[in-house]
Image: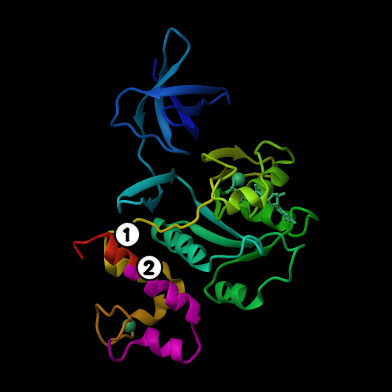
């Protein structure tokens, strides 16, 4: 009998599949071509020995990708509707990583929000957060320690399937536990993160009582979405969008072309220099990783 299920966790060789009744099954895959990832809808069957086998991965509505160390496309999660990019005063924010996640969200068709966590430790960096607000992203200032902003964050997650992403140690699992009201995910000290060891090692999907589903994912040191086509990077920056049509050249890359509306807006202070720099650096990165450019 073919059953339907939802992948709630991916392990090295297996996945955990949740069936319609909420029961969870450890499943292998019927063949090596099948690569189920977290939040995939799958068909699977139960073997006589009580283990499951995934026989089909159903069509994905959205896909979050990353470039692996060899420049290849790696799939992170499927069927998300929203990305929650978390930063904190410690570890020191890498805004490039934030921007790249936001590009990933735009290109994957996901909504996105920025969460400045650990607000109990330091005043929020107003300039940086303003950059995101001006680009159209909701910004949430939270503290797991004293509960600041948690109710508003829960509301923003309602009805969405979101993933918590960001550097290791910013408090993704802590936010998840607080939202669930339960210590389901291990959380770690900063010392671990500083030495490159991550507390969370695989992406796991949870259901929130307040509505919505939330994927906790391992922290990253660096991140870039997989991008095949150079011209698409600009679409990852919503504040460029209205300007692009006003550039003199249809294929303007907004680098050194004359009459570039993006560079004019930059000079006029209408778009943040830091966001523009992130655009340049992502452009350069993808150019080196995908040599056929
Ligand atoms: N002061 C303060 N500490 C926090 C807050 N949120 C999380 N922490 C602490 O930050 C540390 C890292 O938290 P985690 O939730 O494990 O971070 P993570 O983002 O899940 O890390 P990885 O799983 O490695 O990606 C833990 O020691 C938490 O207790 C907060 O709002 N305020
Ligand atoms: Mg974690
Ligand atoms: Zn231009």
User: N-terminal of the two: label 2 or label 1?
Assistant: 1
What residue is shown with label 1?
A: 227
On screen, residue 89 versus residue 202, left or right, reads: right
Cβ atoms under marks 2 and 1 closer than 8 Å: yes
Q: Point out residue 247 in the picture as x, y percentages from the top left corner.
A: 31, 85
What residue is shown with label 2?
A: 282
- Number of marks in picture: 2
Q: CA distance from mark 2 to mark 1?
A: 10 Å
The stretch drawn in magenta includes residue 131: no
Q: Is residue 171 above or below residue 12?
A: below
Please give the name of the residue rendered at 39% of the width and 52% of the height, measured from the top-left corner: 66
Q: Point out residue 235 in the picture as x, y percentages from the top left corner.
A: 37, 69
Asked whether residue 158 appears in the rendered view, the answer is no
Please give the name of the residue rendered at 38% of the width and 45% of the height, measured from the top-left corner: 75
Quadrant the C terminus occupies? bottom left
Magenta stretch, residue numbers: 257-284
- Circle 2 SS class: helix
Residue 149, numbered circle: none
On screen, residue 171 versus residue 273, left or right, reads: right
Nearest the camera: 77 or 120? 120
Nearest the camera: 31 or 138? 31
The stretch drawn in magenta includes residue 258: yes
Q: Point out residue 234 in the picture as x, y percentages from the top left corner.
A: 36, 71
The furthest residue to the left: 292
**Viewer-nearest of labels 2 and 1?**
2
């Amino acid at each position: 009998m073919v059953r339907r299920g939802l992948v709630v966790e991916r392990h090295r060789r297996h996945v955990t599949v949740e069936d319609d009744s909420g029961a969870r099954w450890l499943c292998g895959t019927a063949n090596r071509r099948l690569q189920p990832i977290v939040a995939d809808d799958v068909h699977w069957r139960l073997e006589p020995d009580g283990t499951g086998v995934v026989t089909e991965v159903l069509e994905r509505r959205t896909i979050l990708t990353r470039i692996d160390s060899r420049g290849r496309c790696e799939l992170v999660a499927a069927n998300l509707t929203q990305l929650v990019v978390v930063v904190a005063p410690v570890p020191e924010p890498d805004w490039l990583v934030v921007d790249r996640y936001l590009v990933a969200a735009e290109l994957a068709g996901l909504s996105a929000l920025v969460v400045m966590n650990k607000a109990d430790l330091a005043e929020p960096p107003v300039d940086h957060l303003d950059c995101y607000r001006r680009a159209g992203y909701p910004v949430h200032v939270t503290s797991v320690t004293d509960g600041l902003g948690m109710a508003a964050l829960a509301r923003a997650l309602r009805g969405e399937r979101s993933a918590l992403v960001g550097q290791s140690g910013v408090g993704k699992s802590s936010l998840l536990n607080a939202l669930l009201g339960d210590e389901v995910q291990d959380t770690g000290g900063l010392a671990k993160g500083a030495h490159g060891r991550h507390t969370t090692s695989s992406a796991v999907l949870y259901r929130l009582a307040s509505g919505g589903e939330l994927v906790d994912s391992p922290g990253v040191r660096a991140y870039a979405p997989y991008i095949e086509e150079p011209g698409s990077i600009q679409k990852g920056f919503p504040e460029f969008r209205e300007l692009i049509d006003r550039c003199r050249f249809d294929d303007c890359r907004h680098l050194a072309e004359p009459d570039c509306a993006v560079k004019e807006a930059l000079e006029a202070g209408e778009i943040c220099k830091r966001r523009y720099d992130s655009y340049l650096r992502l452009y350069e990165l993808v150019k080196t990783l995908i040599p056929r450019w």
